[in-house]
Amino acid sequence: MITRTTRLVAIAAAALSVVAAACSDDNDSSSSSPGSITVYSGRSEELVKPLLDQFSAETGITIEFRAGDSGELAAQLITEGDASPADVFFSQDAGALGALQKAGMLSTLPDELLSPVPGAYRSADGEWVGTSGRVRVLVINPDLVANPPTTVDELLDPQWKGRIGFAPSNASWQSFVTGLRVLRGDDGAREWLEGFAANDPVAYEKNGAVRDAVNSGEVAIGLVNHYYLYEKIAADGAANVRAVNQFLAPGDAGGLVNVAGVGVLKSSGNRTAALALVEFLLSETAQRYFAEKTFEYPLVAGVALPDGLPTLDELDPPAIDLSDLDTLAETQELLADVGLLTR
């Protein structure tokens, strides 16, 4: 377990020593002062601000926070290039980190930061690392589903016609489809999507709406991430929630594990402070926060999972290089072609 020990204090001290040196240089016109970092974040400010505030309180390193869609921020960073003010990219999705990696914009992280996270949930080249995980599941209404499907191919059975909910514009759905393309090729993904479309799935704006439709019995099955059910249970109480999660069979394409993750820009003006933030996000405090507050999977050993969650090893998700989830534009084109993008 990475902890906030004297090493993190030393990192902060090093960053602050640079502040002192910079303050003595009247000619320094840098837009990001040493002792501060700019974070482009695909994770919402409401979600991660408590963690970032704690990081600043403990280290004295201030953060300029810029939130947005992960894919759009990745595209912005590529456009900005070396002139970007960003030091850190904190992405909701591994695909956006993969896009920056392939554009050559991320620096290699130290081994001591990478090694506590399993290899499947970090860049093979060491340029980004996952901070928390989420699993694609079927959320089902047991009153309507006696024998839940355990593979995405079973969803193509005519018995589910008009009874499946999904969120076509949601990033996690589109990441699943991208993963399907990686695993089966474009032709194989198209075949599945055409079969899915022929079953008349019901489109909702967001995953939360899919979950609620399943819980109320409006549809029998929904394609969502695992934590949406946990959020509803936390809000309404377990006694008031009928829906349950169905985890998919080992290796099934529908059981994709995606991650939120972080990378440091090569152009960062304060790499020391940027690495301190990466270390903090992998600390016991942050990993426990993701497990207890957002119901995600911690990726560093030693932090308890939310109640009822199988371990990632037990799930045995499909083997995929998460950096390859970067081809979102091609996925959206395919979804549009089969009529599922705005269905």
Image: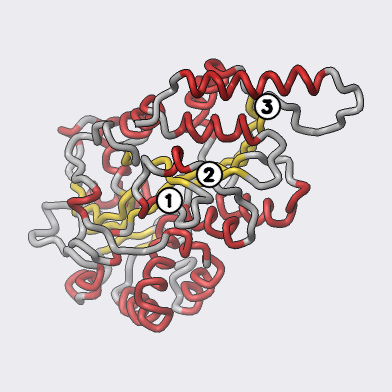
Q: Secondary structure at mark 2?
A: loop
Instruction: Give the residue drawn at x 52%, y 46%.
Output: 91
Horizontal side, residue 314 vs residue 11: left or right: left
- Residue 300 picture quarter: top left
Dot label at residue 36: 3
Front residue (pair 141, 294): 294
Kindly identify which residue carries mark 2.
109
Q: Is residue 297 above or below residue 168?
A: above
Q: Is residue 234 above or below residue 186?
A: above
- Name the secondary structure under disc 1: loop
Residue 40 or residue 282, whichever sits in front: 282
Q: What kind of element bears circle 3?
A: strand
Say whether residue 170 is visible. no
Question: Which class describes the residues within 10 Å of circle 2: few (<14), some (14-19), or many (20+)?
Answer: some
Mark positioned earlier in the residue sequence (2 or 1):
2
Nearest-to-viewer mark from 2 and 1: 2
Amino acid under label 2? Answer: Leu
Percent x, y for residue 125?
A: 50, 56
